[in-house]
Image: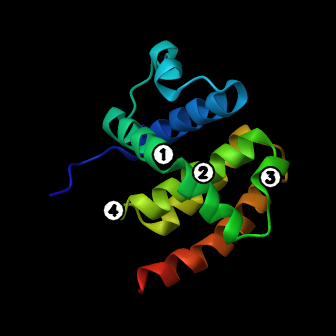
Amino acid sequence: MMTEFNPKERTLARENVLKILYQHDLNEYSLTEIIKTFVEKRNFDKEYFTNIIKLFELNIESIDDFIEKNSDISLITIPCIDRSILRLAVCELRYRDDVPEKVVLNESINIAKKYSSTESYKFINKILDQLLVKIKKNDQK
């Protein structure tokens, strides 16, 4: 049975994960260290937050690998914030079957509009579209 969740708290959980991934990418502190000093006064879906961080930590190489093999980008060449947005989206798309693809896409685009450069959301959308095709193919195996 799925527990009831508040969409606003889930969105905030995603944004908080993004902030953690971004910091981790910038300064290479461990996720655990960053989370220890992370402060969020608003209510957010802590269970989802913790689960996504754990999934990311366990699958970081495979997430990066998947992005690079199935799109026309090299992660090292794109802005840190966009890299974090893509990693978060792929983590959800590949390891959280309970979250509809459309939700992940919409949330990623909204997060890009809020946290990245003006045109970034179009780029995120394009790359996620490329990746989704591959994810769907993998599901049919």
The residue that disc 3 covers is 120
Which element carries disc 1, helix, strand or loop?
helix
Label 4, residues with CA under 10 Å away: few <14, some 14-19, many ≥20: few
Q: Which residue is mark 1?
A: 56
The numbered mark, 2 or 1, whose residue comes first in the sequence reads 1
Question: Dividing the picture into quarters, in which one does residue 111 lie?
Answer: top right
Q: Of the residues shown, which amino acid type is indicated by label 1?
A: Phe
Examine the rendered structure and indicate whether residue 35 appears above or below residue 65. Answer: above
- Residue at 65 percent across and 44 percent down: it is 84
Q: Which mark is residue 98?
A: 4
Secondary structure beneath dot 2 equals helix
Q: How many marks?
A: 4
Mark 4 secondary-structure assignment = loop
Q: Position of residue 14 (x, y in %)?
A: 50, 41
- In percent of width and height, residue 49 lies at 41, 37
Mark found first going from the N terminus, 1 or 3: 1
In contact (CB < 8 Å): disc 2 and disc 1: yes
Name the residue located 75 percent from the left edge and 55 percent from the top edge. 121
Q: Amino acid at mark 3?
A: Ser
In the rendered image, is residue 107 in sight? no
Q: Residues within 10 Å of mark 3 (few under 14, many from 20)?
A: some
* Number of residues whose C-alpha sits closer than 10 Å to that of mark 1, classed few (under 14), some (14–19) or many (20 or more): many
